[in-house]
Amino acid sequence: MKALIILVLAAMIFGAGGYFTYEMFIHPKVALEREKELPPPPPPPDPSVPDFEKAAAVRQNGTLLEAREALSAFVEHNPQSSKIDDARDLLGDVNTAIFLSPIAAPEKEVYIVQKNDVIGRVALRMHTSAELLMRANNLQSSMLRIGQKLSVSPGEFSLVISRKTDKVVLLNKGRFFKQYAVRSWPPIHAKKAAAAHKASPPLPKQMGKVIDKLAWLNGARVLYSDKGYINATHWIQINIPGCTLYGDPVANADAPNAKPPSGGIMLPPDAPAELAALLSKGAPVTLE
């Protein structure tokens, strides 16, 4: 009988100890392993999405000026939104549609061509570029007529090239204007761009400027006043190594001149021609 009692007491003691050990050490570990196997919980709903949808609807149903106001407000007040890139893409398209056309806008001026005016002189007088005057007024020739009305869009453009976001961002007077997706980095920046995506310290900034805008057509250099300039192959030369901007070559590209000899940053096909109209030589550039 005593032996039986001893066995029962031993079972109770060791059973309690085993249960205690399981609850304290084994069970939490098993629960943690099971939790790791579960799919991640869905993210909480983004409260800014309805506001984005309203702004996007204005783009579809309203005027360009109304869309600019709605999208600008969304971008300014919702920088952390899951829809911020979509909003910036829409806003960039609206900004360029207004800026590179004769569409009336509050910030634009109207210049009336006088006797002896030439487009270069008008551009100098109005603090803009001849390329931009031609593009914004849909001019097919640099010849002007007395009394002709020219729409002048004021701009102070700069660029930010971001290796972390794979974007080239165009700013006007320090405010967002448009962004372009980087399709390919040159070797000099490829590894740093990959590293910038990780949670590593920010890369040091490099400051530079636009030093030239080149256009090629049928293997020859062309100027803004030449026929076919807008459809030429464009490069934006920047005095930071490896940062010349060029477009993704397309089937009908001027193949020998589609890519700069020393490489560069490849953007969508139409981006360099657009940037050539908007940027001036000397425009500030930041590589980050």
Image (cartoon, rainbow, N blue to C red):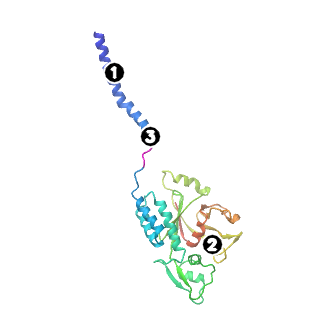
Inspect the image, locate mark 3, and give the three-letter code of the amino acid beneath it.
Leu
Q: Main secondary structure of the magenta part?
A: loop
Name the element at disc 1: helix
Percent of width and height locating residue 6: 30, 14
49 left or right of 231 in image: left
Q: Residue at x 42, y 67 (%)?
A: 73
The residue singled out by tag 3 in the image is 38
11 left or right of 256 in image: left
Name the element at disc 2: helix
State the quadrant of the N terminus.
Answer: top left
The residue singled out by tag 1 in the image is 14
Seen as rendered, the residue at the extreme top is 1
Mark seen at residue 280: none
Inspect the image, locate mark 1, and give the three-letter code of the amino acid beneath it.
Phe
The residue singled out by tag 2 in the image is 230
Within the image, what quadrant is residue 119 found in?
Answer: bottom right
Task: Report the mark closest to the observer, 2 or 1.
Answer: 2
Please say whether residue 41 is one of the residues in the magenta stretch: yes
Location of residue 13 with respect to 125 vertically, above or below: above
> Which region of the structure is painted magenta?
38-42
Q: Out of 249 and 118, give the one closest to the viewer.
A: 249
Between the residue at mark 1 and the residue at mark 3, the CA separation in whole angstroms equals 34 Å
**Mark 2 Cα within 10 Å, few/some/many (few <14, many 20+)?**
many
**Mark 1 Cα within 10 Å, few/some/many (few <14, many 20+)?**
few
Location of residue 24 with respect to 41 vertically, above or below: above
Q: Residue at x 63, y 83 (%)?
A: 143
In this view of the protein, can residue 24 be seen by the observer? yes
